C-alpha cells in the first residue's frame, strides 16, 4: 500500500505539472473545441512514450511491424518511443521512476492490475468530443466493458484489436473416423455428442474428442457469469456457475478423454490438438498461434447454448489507454484515432487481427493476407453476437484463480461441483476481504 500511495502522489503531481505546462492544441490550458470541425492537428515534433503490458514477447520489431510504421507514415513529426515490458520496465518500476507514458496497450483482463491499480486512469470523453470520434462504429460491447470498468459513463481507453472467437477442429480425424464435420450452428450438446464419437482408441493411440483452454473459455463464458458481484464483490455469487461447471467438465468424464492436473492445463490441452494431433476439436476463444499449425484444420462458430442461440463468447479487447499523467494527450489520442480507423483496421484484419469495427467488409477480409487462412471458414472468426461482458471489478483475478482451481478439481474427479464451488467462493471472499483491508 505504500507503493500505491506513492503512485497516487506521483499521478497527482504530474497531472498538476501537465495542467500548468499545457497540452497540445490548448490555449493557456483552456481547451478550445470547434463545434463544427475536429480540432486542428499540430505538427510540432513530439515524442510519444508507448508502453505495452501484455507480453514480454512484444518487442520493438513487433511494434514497428504492427503499428509503428503505420503511425510514422501518418504522422512523420512524431517520434515513437516504444517501451517493451520486461525486467526493469514493468508498470510498477516505470511509475516509481516517474517515466512519462502517453499510450498504454493493455488487455481487458489486465486493466485493473496494470492500469487502474496505479491510478493512471483518466476519462477520454473530452478528447472524444474534441476530435468528433464516432463511437458508434465500434462494437458496443467494447464500450460497455469500459463503462463497467469505470462504474459510470467514463471511457478510459479505446479498443484496438478484438479477440477472435472460433472453435477449431482437425478435419483429418473427422475423415479418419467417418464423422461429419461440425458446422456453425451447433450447440454445446451437439458438440458433446460428436466428442463422444471421436473419443476412441485405434492402433494403440488414444484419440480425444475435445480439448479446451478452460481459463480462456470461462473468462469469456457465454452465460456472462461474473467472477465477483459488481456491488457486493462476493465471489461466484451467480447460481449459473454450477450449471456452467457441470456442462463444461462433462467432456472430461467421457471415457478416454479424462484428464489429471497436468493434462488439464491450457498448454497441455493445446499440444494434444496442435502438436500431437490426437484431439479432434479444440475450444480456445482467441488466436492461439494457429498460423504455425502443421495440420488440416478448420474452424466453426463457437458452439452456443440452446437458450441463447448465436451468442458467442464475451469480447476481450485490447485497449489503448492515455494515462492521466500524459503530457501529450491530444497527440496520443490522434494516434489512437488513426489506429482504430477503417484504413488501419482493414490492414490488420487482412493480417489476422480481429477488428474492433462493425464493418462487414473488414470482417470478411480477415486473414486474406495470411496463407494459412486460405480456404478456411472465415465467417467463424467473429460471433453473430458477443455475450454481455461480466462485471469488471478489481477482484476478478482473485476469483478467477480460485474458480479455475475448482474447475480442475471437478474435471479430474477430485471434488464434486457443490463442494468445489463453495470452497472456491470461501477462499476468494477471504482474499477479497484482505485486499480491501490492505487498500485502507
Image (tube, helix red, strand yellow):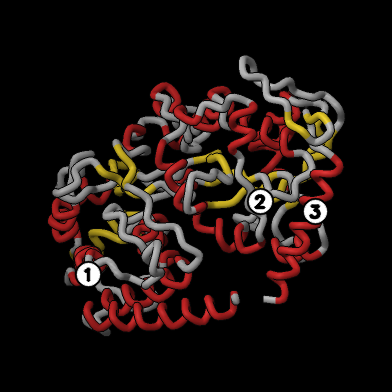
Q: Earlier in the sequence, mark 1 or mark 3?
A: 3
Rounded to the nearest angstrom, the CA distance separating label 1 from label 3 is 47 Å
Residue 242: which disc? 1
> In the displayed structure, does residue 22 sit left or right of residue 58?
right
Q: Residue at x 70, y 22 (%)?
A: 39
Q: Is residue 17 left or right of residue 307?
A: right
The residue pinned by badge 2 equals: 52
Circles 3 and 2 in contact, beta carbons < 8 Å: no
First reached walking from the N terminus: tag 3 or tag 2: 3
Residue 397, image x, y percentages: 48, 68
**First in sequence: mark 1 or mark 2?**
2
Q: Quadrant of residue 181?
A: top left
Is residue 342 visible in this depiction of the protein?
A: yes
Name the residue tied to disc 3.
14
| Relative to 4, residue 209 above or below | above
Q: Are marks 1 and 3 in contact (CB under 8 Å)?
A: no
10 Å neighbourhood of mark 1: few (<14), some, or many (≥20)? some
**Residue at 80% from the left image edge and 26% from the top image edge:** 76
Amino acid at each position: 500500500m505504500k507503493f500505491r500511495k506513492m503512485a497516487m502522489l506521483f499521478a497527482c503531481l504530474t497531472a498538476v505539472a501537465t495542467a500548468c505546462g499545457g497540452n497540445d492544441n490548448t490555449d493557456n490550458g483552456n481547451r478550445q473545441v470547434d463545434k463544427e470541425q475536429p480540432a486542428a492537428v499540430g505538427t510540432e515534433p513530439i515524442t510519444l512514450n508507448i508502453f505495452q503490458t501484455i507480453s514480454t514477447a512484444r518487442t520493438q520489431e513487433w511494434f514497428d511491424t504492427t503499428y509503428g510504421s503505420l503511425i510514422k507514415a501518418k504522422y512523420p513529426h512524431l517520434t515513437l518511443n516504444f517501451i517493451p515490458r520486461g525486467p526493469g520496465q514493468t508498470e510498477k518500476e516505470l511509475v516509481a521512476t516517474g517515466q512519462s507514458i502517453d499510450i498504454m496497450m493493455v488487455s481487458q483482463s489486465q486493466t485493473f492490475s496494470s492500469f487502474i491499480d496505479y491510478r493512471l486512469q483518466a476519462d477520454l470523453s473530452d478528447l472524444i468530443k474534441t476530435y468528433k470520434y464516432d463511437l458508434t462504429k465500434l462494437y458496443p460491447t467494447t464500450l460497455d466493458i469500459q463503462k463497467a470498468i469505470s462504474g459510470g459513463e467514463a471511457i478510459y481507453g479505446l479498443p484496438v484489436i478484438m479477440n477472435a472467437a472460433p472453435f477449431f477442429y482437425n478435419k483429418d480425424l473427422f475423415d479418419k473416423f467417418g464423422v461429419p464435420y461440425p458446422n456453425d450452428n451447433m450447440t454445446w450438446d451437439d458438440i458433446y455428442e460428436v466428442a463422444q464419437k471421436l473419443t476412441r482408441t485405434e492402433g494403440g493411440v488414444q484419440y480425444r474428442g475435445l480439448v479446451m483452454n478452460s481459463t480462456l473459455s470461462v473468462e469469456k463464458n457465454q452465460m456472462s457469469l461474473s467472477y465477483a458481484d459488481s456491488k457486493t464483490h462476493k465471489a461466484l455469487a451467480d447460481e449459473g456457475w454450477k450449471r456452467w461447471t457441470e456442462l463444461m467438465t462433462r467432456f472430461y468424464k467421457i471415457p478416454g478423454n479424462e484428464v489429471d492436473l497436468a493434462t488439464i492445463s491450457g498448454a497441455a490441452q493445446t499440444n494434444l490438438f496442435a502438436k500431437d494431433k490426437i484431439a479432434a476439436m479444440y475450444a480456445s476463444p482467441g488466436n492461439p498461434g494457429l498460423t504455425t499449425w502443421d495440420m488440416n484444420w478448420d474452424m466453426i462458430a463457437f458452439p452456443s447454448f440452446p437458450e441463447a442461440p448465436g451468442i458467442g463468447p464475451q469480447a476481450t479487447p485490447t485497449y489503448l489507454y492515455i494515462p492521466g499523467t500524459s503530457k501529450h494527450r491530444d497527440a496520443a489520442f490522434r494516434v489512437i484515432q488513426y489506429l482504430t480507423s477503417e484504413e488501419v483496421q482493414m490492414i490488420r484484419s487482412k493480417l489476422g487481427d480481429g477488428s474492433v469495427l462493425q464493418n462487414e467488409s473488414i470482417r470478411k477480409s480477415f486473414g486474406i493476407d495470411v496463407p494459412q487462412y486460405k480456404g478456411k471458414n472465415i465467417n467463424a472468426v467473429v460471433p453473430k453476437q458477443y455475450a454481455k461482458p461480466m462485471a469488471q471489478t478489481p477482484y476478478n483475478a482473485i476469483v478467477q484463480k480460485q474458480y479455475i482451481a475448482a474447475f480442475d478439481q471437478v474435471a479430474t474427479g477430485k471434488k464434486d461441483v457443490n463442494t468445489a464451488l463453495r470452497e472456491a467462493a470461501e477462499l476468494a471472499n477471504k482474499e477479497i476481504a484482505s485486499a480491501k483491508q490492505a487498500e485502507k
